[in-house]
Image (cartoon, grey):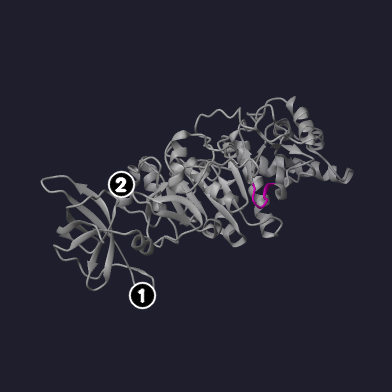
Amino acid sequence: MYKLVGTISGEVGLHEFDFNVTGEVRRNEYVKVWNEADGWILGRVVSIVEAEKKTATAEIVGYKDERGFLMQPKNTFSRDVKVFKADQTFIMDTLGLKSGGINLGMLEGRDIPVHLRKEELIQKHCSILAKTGSGKSYTAGVLIEELLEKNVPLLIIDPHGEYITLKYENRSEEERKQMAKFGIAPKGYASKVVVYTPANFSINPAADKLFRIDGINLSVNELYDLFPLSDAQLGVLYQSINEIKAEKEFYTIEDIIKKVSESKSSAKWRIVHFLERIRETGILSDSPTRIEELVKVGEASIIDMKGADPKLQQLIVYRICKEVFEGRKMGKIPPFMLVIEEAHNFCPERGFEKAVSSNILRTIASEGRKFGLGLLVISQRPARVDKNVISQCNTQIILRVTNPNDIKALSRGLEFMSSEMEEEIKRIPQGVALLSSPSIEMPILVDVRVRRSEHGGRAVEVEGVAKKEPKKEELAVREKEGGKSMFAKLLFE
């Protein structure tokens, strides 16, 4: 039995219609109207006006034809046609909502599950964009949990250490009460999450392992990636490294510093300065972190960069992305998802700033899908993220955005954005996201499910939670690293 909610009256167009409200209806509710030519037509309530008579306006979503294509009715509705609340099956069929896959949450206002296809995220990239405090990292945590449940390898660039709490189950009483609605239970992923620090264990004691870059036999090109060089400086570096190669098979940054210092050119001092700063960070090692260790089936590797200078963070992202992209092309590592938090810092839009990591992220955005390298881009400043990277993300998850520049950037970069959508994202409530995905017929609002694991953006005590015991060899490294000086934060001054 269909539930009557109103009767069409007032303005009636090809794309929307007004109706007098006689039943229970709310904004963003889905309704359906019978059309003799096309059958049942799906609509969505976009506004409600309380006056002498309660009226509402609904946008026309459309109907599925015999080929399965979403179509718009050819004729306008007649006045006095009845409006009914749309049933779950009709909504799912018309919008293209499928069961199974990545559980993002529920269709806003209805208990209809919204799932994304795992293959789409990896093969077609995804972005999560929102203003600060609107839930972007929380939503990213939901996706990461789902990918871990599907044993998809993850490599997470985490500038602020927000994702380490994936290890611990959600202890929020309020959120635990909501879990049954979404068909989930509290869960920590300590057995699947490994946290790496580019600093040391004094700065980041919660990390599991050190992250290090190969410091043996650094080439001129690799050093050029680390800092800008003039032609004169480049000449000094070339000559110094060529002389070292003639003397020994293996060399370190210490050897390069010594050889450059012996140069008679005045250009040597700036090179020595930068080389010494790099050495002081401790990021270079003769036992570097291998990409085969970082990308493993069923595991998430988190690069927790707390304590690292922003420029050094960009360098680390550049090196990691370059190596995993090449590794994926050569089949050295399995297909995986690369998660870039605070993406505006690592692939900034031209005109804002420069980042050594920009070009490789643009390459991954445009070519990574061919090699099974998916990208999840997360940012609180859409206007500051490279528009070419954002435009390559076929799945868009947008939470509340109010900054005019960010809204303009979204309108320019995303095909589905309209003036109505611009107004929509300004007033999206907490915990709700606007979702656009290739498998869903039109952008929809989703009530994002609660997390199984603890959220790093929330103040939480985790002292009582059991932590994985480090291996003996790790303890030895910790002891050695513990005495190091603080991470060189002025590396690129």
Residue marked by disc 1 = 66
User: Is residue 468 found left or right of 42 in the rendered image?
Assistant: right
Q: Is residue 351 visible?
A: no
SS assignment at label 2:
helix
Q: Which residue is rendered at x = 63% and y = 37% of the image?
A: 312
Q: Quadrant of the N terminus?
A: bottom left
Q: Residues within 10 Å of mark 1 (few under 14, many from 20)?
A: few
Residue 479 location (% of width, % of height): 77, 28
Question: Magenta: predominant secondary structure element?
Answer: loop
Q: Looking at the rendering, which quadrant does residue 331 occupy?
A: bottom right
What amino acid does circle 1 point to? Answer: Glu
Residue identifier under label 2 = 423
* Residue occupying the point 20% across, 52% down: 23
Graded by Cα atoms within 10 Å as few (under 14), some (14 to 19) or many (20 or more), the crowding at tag 2 reads: few
Magenta includes 450?
no
- The residue stretch that appears in magenta: 294-299
Q: Judge depth for marks 2 and 1 and give the one in front.
A: 1
Give percent across and percent down for residue 78.
16, 66
Percent position (x, y) of residue 175? 45, 38
Q: Is residue 181 above or below residue 475?
A: below
**Residue 401 vertical placement versus 363 (above, below):** above
Earlier sequence position, callout 2 versus callout 1:
1
Residue nearest the viewer, comparing 217 with 135:
135
The answer to which quarter of the image holds residue 334 is bottom right
Q: Can the viewer see residue 154?
A: yes
Quadrant of image for the C terminus:
top right
Three-letter amino acid code at the position of disc 2: Glu
Quarter of the image where one finds residue 304: top right
